[in-house]
């Protein structure tokens, strides 16, 4: 095992874990072998650092520096990825936390308040469909019984996957003991846009997250033969889904004004025709819709408009549309006091000075925890501006700057 705590070296250690040869990038889904390997790596490295490692009831892993107790300064992120994701979304926050704690220890810093590095489970919702699942279970934002019964694409339930990974699914749900121990939580994350590149700064502090929901769609048509069915006689749900997706895009595109301070985003990133054969008119299409907006009312209105447009578009193709909400989180405004503390701590370091403040369209565990305790985020420059794709990037220097910024902030909060 290496004894380097440089964040770049830490990321290099896991660079081969969970590579996806088909999609490119990484596919590290909760409780699957690659993600389990990352959990084992995190546990080993945290123990090597002298931290006390313990999984919680919901599959999140906690590594404590100091006796667990009230006022704990939490930091960390997640180790899972989207299908074919980048190297930084998630692991950068976990590796930076380890690196920051190691640096503080090496400097002889003694925390007055305990520090906990946390690796959250299933942040992307790539396997069981609910984003930020580990933090939502911990805060009671989701129904544990419903989560236990949710199945992945292979029919494996969350309960089965958790139990197989050694997380007792009978115990999942709100965790008051853990939550009440946390005084605050700071998540470092790669930026999922180009703002820092345009500004010319390595690090920012987050201000807010868009409201965000996911809906399961089903377009019902009539299965039939590709050669024997005249075009006029079809009720093809693939055509209906296509028309509905275009309609959703048009509604969101008309509202989305990035230069005018309005965000309205609609995405269908996953479509499954059933049964799915080249010479088969499908009987049904399953699809998943992701919608984001600035505020809860604006997002609800956007979803209502999108739903109506989808129903009309699919109806013109003779198909019926079902739209079922799977998850929803209103917009998040991060704690202004904590944000100011982060900015003040960084302003005292010449390398950082006055750091920019950025809002984001991406969801994070820090956004879920914000309903319970003061949370804040640090963003690290991403020159490509791309995320949830292999082109996601960050330079070695910026990764190190991020870890140094996190160490500065942890020292201010735990000292
Ligand atoms: C998670 O990264 C999300 O914002 O979808
Ligand atoms: Mn992500
Ligand atoms: Mn992330
Ligand atoms: Mn995320």
Image: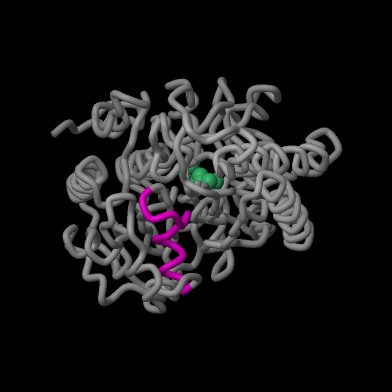
Q: Does the magenta portion include 158?
A: no
Q: Name above or below for residue 293 compared with residue 238.
A: below
Q: What span is colored magenta in the figure?
A: 127-140
- Residue 88 visible: yes
Q: Which residue sits at x=47%, y=29%? A: 227
Residue at image point 33% right, 59% down: 151
Q: Residue furthest right?
A: 260
Q: Is residue 50 above or below residue 21?
A: below
Q: Position of residue 294 (x, y in %)?
A: 74, 52
Q: Which residue lies at the image location 48% right of the left edge and 33% below the top edge? A: 228
Q: Is residue 128 magenta?
A: yes
The foreground one among 147 and 171 is 147
Residue 30 on image: x %, y %: 31, 50
Quadrant of the snapshot with the N terminus:
top left
Residue 188 is at least partly visible in this image:
no
Q: Position of residue 374 (x, y in %)?
A: 58, 64
Give whichever of 340, 411 is nearer the camera: 340
Query: Does 283 sit above or below residue 379?
Result: below
Of 363 and 149, nearer the camera is 149
Q: Is residue 21 above or below residue 145?
A: above
Indicate the quadrant where residue 262 lies: top right
Seen from the viewer's position, the closer of residues 129 and 363 is 129
Is 171 on the left or on the right of 199, as rendered? Answer: left
- Colour convention of the picture: one colour
In terms of image quadrants, where is residue 305? bottom right
Q: Does residue 297 appear left or right of residue 204 in this picture?
A: right
Specify the farthest residue to the left.
1
Residue 143 in the image: state x and y as whole percent: 44, 74
């Amino acid at each position: 095992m290496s004894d380097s705590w440089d964040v770049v070296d830490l990321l290099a250690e896991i660079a081969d874990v969970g590579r996806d040869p088909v999609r490119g990038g990484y596919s590290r889904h909760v409780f699957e072998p690659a993600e389990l390997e990352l959990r084992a790596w995190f546990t080993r490295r945290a123990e090597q650092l002298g931290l006390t490692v313990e999984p919680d009831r919901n599959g999140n892993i906690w590594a404590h520096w100091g006796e667990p107790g009230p006022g704990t300064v939490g930091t960390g992120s997640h180790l899972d990825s989207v299908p074919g994701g980048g190297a930084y979304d998630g692991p950068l926050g976990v590796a930076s936390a380890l690196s920051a704690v190691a640096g503080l220890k090496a400097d002889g810093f003694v925390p007055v308040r305990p520090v906990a590095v946390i690796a959250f489970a299933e942040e992307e919702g790539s396997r069981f469909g609910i984003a930020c699942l580990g933090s939502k279970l911990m805060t009671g934002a989701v129904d544990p019984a419903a989560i236990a019964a949710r199945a992945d694409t292979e029919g494996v339930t969350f309960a089965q996957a958790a139990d197989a990974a050694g997380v007792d699914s009978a115990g999942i749900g709100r965790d008051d003991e853990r939550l009440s121990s946390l005084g605050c939580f700071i998540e470092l994350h790669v930026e999922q846009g180009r703002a820092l590149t345009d500004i010319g700064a390595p690090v920012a502090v987050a201000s807010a997250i868009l409201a965000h929901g996911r809906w399961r769609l089903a377009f019902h048509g009539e299965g039939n033969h590709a050669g024997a069915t005249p075009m006029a006689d079809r009720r093809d749900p693939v055509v209906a889904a296509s028309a509905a997706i275009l309609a959703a895009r048009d509604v969101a595109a008309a509202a989305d004004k990035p230069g005018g301070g309005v965000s309205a985003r609609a995405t269908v990133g996953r479509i499954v025709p059933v049964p799915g054969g080249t010479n088969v008119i499908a009987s049904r299409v399953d699809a998943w819709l992701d919608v984001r907006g600035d505020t809860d009312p604006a997002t609800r209105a956007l979803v209502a408009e999108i739903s109506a447009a989808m129903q009309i578009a699919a109806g013109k193709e003779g198909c019926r549309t079902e739209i079922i909400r799977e998850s929803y989180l209103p917009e998040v405004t991060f704690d202004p006091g904590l944000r100011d503390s982060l900015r003040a701590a960084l302003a005292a370091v010449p390398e950082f000075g006055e750091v920019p403040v950025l809002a984001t369209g991406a969801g994070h565990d820090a956004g879920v925890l914000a309903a319970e305790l003061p949370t804040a985020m640090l963003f690290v420059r991403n020159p490509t501006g791309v995320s949830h794709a292999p082109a996601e990037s960050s330079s070695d220097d910026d990764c190190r700057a991020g870890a140094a910024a996190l160490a500065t902030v942890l020292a201010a909060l735990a000292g």
